[in-house]
Image (cartoon, rainbow, N blue to C red):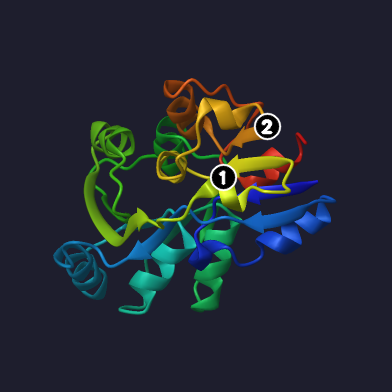
Amino acid sequence: MKIAVTKLEEKSEGVAELFRRHGHEAIIVPTMRAGEPSDPAPLERLSSMLKNGEIDILVFTSALGVAKLCDRVKPDDVRIVSVGPKTADKVKEYGLSSEVINKFSSDNFADYLGDIKGKTIGIARAQVPNHELTESLISKGAVVVEAPAYSLEPAGNDITDALQGVEAVIFTSARSFEYSGFTSNDAGKFKVAAIGEKTASAMKKHGIEPDIIGNGTLESCLLQF
């Protein structure tokens, strides 16, 4: 199948090969572009705390977040946790190692980290707050230092033009769906997938019931086609 996927250009490395392994062709259709964070101070603060050994656990939620932080500082002597294998691969490019959590939700992430009471956890992420994650970590006694490493802005393209000739579309985040302009009228023309539950919830609010809901990874969606 020809499958459109709403990946950022900066985060699309390896996507085409992944789809080929599953017998499909990926059509990258970015509905967002990455920009600089509106306030650079939090990222500067996290970088400084890493240099001073004040962070116990460092969390990366995307490969782009890895690049944005590690271009500033090499986080040595800290426990690093990556959300997904692509993020972990980017960590390796900087000569570092990380633990990988493949299925992401706020609750299971906090449980995965174990006893975090009194620990300081740094999170390098997109400028899209995840209040559920932050609250779950704080509820377990952690101190959370969040740093938006990049912003996500509308790409300004018309997704309906980009979907000509494809048979399915995978939305990779709630924000990528919301910026797409995709409607319930469009949904009947394609097999529609949400990469995870949060993306599916955003789609349902607009009257679109996904045919496929993954566990947070593209591969989990591809396995259902």
Q: Which residue is mark 2?
A: 189
Q: Secondary structure at mark 1?
A: helix
Residue 104 placement, left or right of 67: right
Q: Secondary structure at mark 2?
A: loop
- Relative depth, front residue between 97 and 89: 89
| N-term-proximal mark, 1 vs 2 | 1
- Which residue is at a point 46% across and 57% down the rendered structure image? 62
The residue at 48%/22% (across/down) is 204
Numbered tag placed on residue 210 in the rendering: none
Mark 2 and mark 1 in contact (Cβ < 8 Å)?
no
Residue 212 in percent (x, y) is at 66, 29
Quadrant hosting residue 139: top left
Q: Is 56 in front, or is 49?
A: 49
For the question of whether residue 29 can be seen, the reply is yes
Q: Is residue 104 above or below residue 73?
A: above
Q: Is residue 53 above or below residue 224?
A: below
Which residue is at a point 49% across and 73% down the rendered structure image? 96
Disc 1 target residue: 160
Give the image location of residue 206, x and y in percent: 44, 24
Residue type marked 2: Lys
Which image quarter: residue 15? bottom right
Q: Is residue 81 toward the left or the right of residue 24 in the image?
A: left
Camera sees residue 214: no
Residue 135, by quadrant, is top left
Q: Is residue 4 above or below residue 183?
A: below
What whole-number distance in Å separates the C-alpha atoms at marks 1 and 2? 11 Å
Q: Dot 1, crowdedness within 10 Å: few (<14), some or many (≥20)?
A: few
Mark 2 Cα shell of 10 Å, populated few (<14), some (14-19), many (≥20): few
Vertical side of 102 occupied by 96: above or below: below
| Residue type indicated by callout 1 | Thr
